[in-house]
Amino acid sequence: MIAQSEVSMDSIVVGRSARMRAVFEFLRVIGNSDSTVLITGESGTGKEVTATLIHQSSRRKHRPFVAVSCALFSETLIESELFGHERGAFTGAIKDRPSRFELAEGGTIFLDDIDDVPLSMQVKLLRVLQNRTIERLGGTRTIPINVRIITGSKRDLKQMVAEGKFREDLYYRLNVLPLALPPLRERREDIPILMQHFLERYFRRRGEDVPPVSDVVKEAFMRYTWRGNVRELENACERIAQTCTCGTVRVGCMSARILFRAGAQPSAAAAPMAIPQQTVPISLDDRLREVEAHLIGWALKVSGGNKSRAAELLQIKRSTLGDRINRCGLGKLAAGEDASEGVSSRGSSVPAEESRVPSV
């Protein structure tokens, strides 16, 4: 069960790690401020949801929250999208269009991907921050605005300033209240609670309770790198909820990508076989036995030599695994010896550098 203080509006801002507790405390402190907030973090860490949380904890919560991804618009469109336009400003402008700032009047505007705003537009954003006014494209009126501005960036703006890709004066205007969201790999202790949170969400949408989750699945989630951060984890949980029909969340319910890439570090699992470039005969049966031996060796190492767990990883019966271990000459690995050395289907050693996670 997730405490109310740890999740809002069924959001992805969930966690009990020290890093996330610090984030929640910072959000509590800045909630009623009108100062500009700069949220930084990798893709999928929850920047927009965090901005929404700031808005909902502020005195502006009953006014609009407008989120805009600056990465969605080309350089020619972004000015019209952000600042609006007057009728006749350009071909196709048949009526006035209010700016996103006007739509957020009295509330909060979240400008995500601020690092993608071209230099030509950055000076106009600077004027908005300085003067709290905007001018529509093709217009001459100065329109006052009353909005709180929150921005999000997936890149280091300070580094972009050093590279001449971002205005220094705009950076300092945006960086009044900086908030860095940690990637999931830096708060792995939150993975179980996030996993439970999302499984509950998607199983309930099916009108079902969350089934038990096997230890192997939990371990795979803990070991996986989650390059897509919380968003990727949420998608993985949704997939499980849509495909699991066995009463228990088992290995077969997981994405193969997560299963094989979570099993171990790069030297711990099996490598896909290279395709010969020469037009010489090869034995398909021998190659298939080699692949089988690589994968069994990977499963035995990941499971610490536990045949039951290795069989579950490979989605075969334990008795079947025993037969294949004997056929591939992997008896020493099954007995707990160093799996990183591997054994080919003919019993010869396989170099450790070949023992990598297969591409799935």
Image (tube, helix red, strand yellow):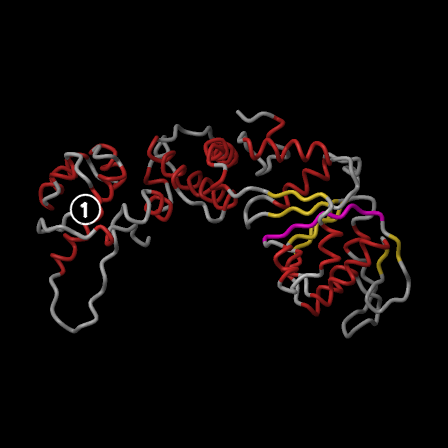
Above or below residue 79? Residue 301 is above
Horizontal arrangement in the rendering, residue 158 relative to residue 282 (left or right): right
Magenta stretch, main secondary structure, is: strand
In the displayed structure image, the side of residue 327 where residue 100 appears, left or right: right
Residue at 48% from the left image edge and 46% from the top image edge: 232
Looking at the image, is 104 positioned above or below residue 313?
Answer: below
Q: Residue 208 location in percent, x, y?
A: 47, 30
Residue 218 inside the magenta-drawn segment: no
The vertical placement of 358 against 24, above or below, is below
Determine which residue is flagged by label 1. Answer: 341
Q: Which residues are the magenta region?
A: 146-154
Q: Secondary structure at mark 1?
A: helix
Query: Crowdedness of circle 1 by 10 Å Cα count: few (<14), some, many (20+)?
Result: some
Residue shown at 62%/48% (left/top)? 40
- In which quarter of the view is residue 247 placed? top left
Q: Is residue 300 visible?
A: yes
Q: Name the one closer to the observer, 308 or 121.
A: 121
Q: Of 255 and 209, which appears nearest the observer?
A: 255
Percent x, y for residue 202?
50, 37
148 is within the stretch colored magenta: yes
Instruction: Please give the name of the residue rendered at 76% of the width and 36% of the height, measured from the top-left corner.
Output: 58
> Residue at position x 42%, y 45% from top?
225
Instruction: Please name the amino acid that badge 1 sits on.
Output: Glu
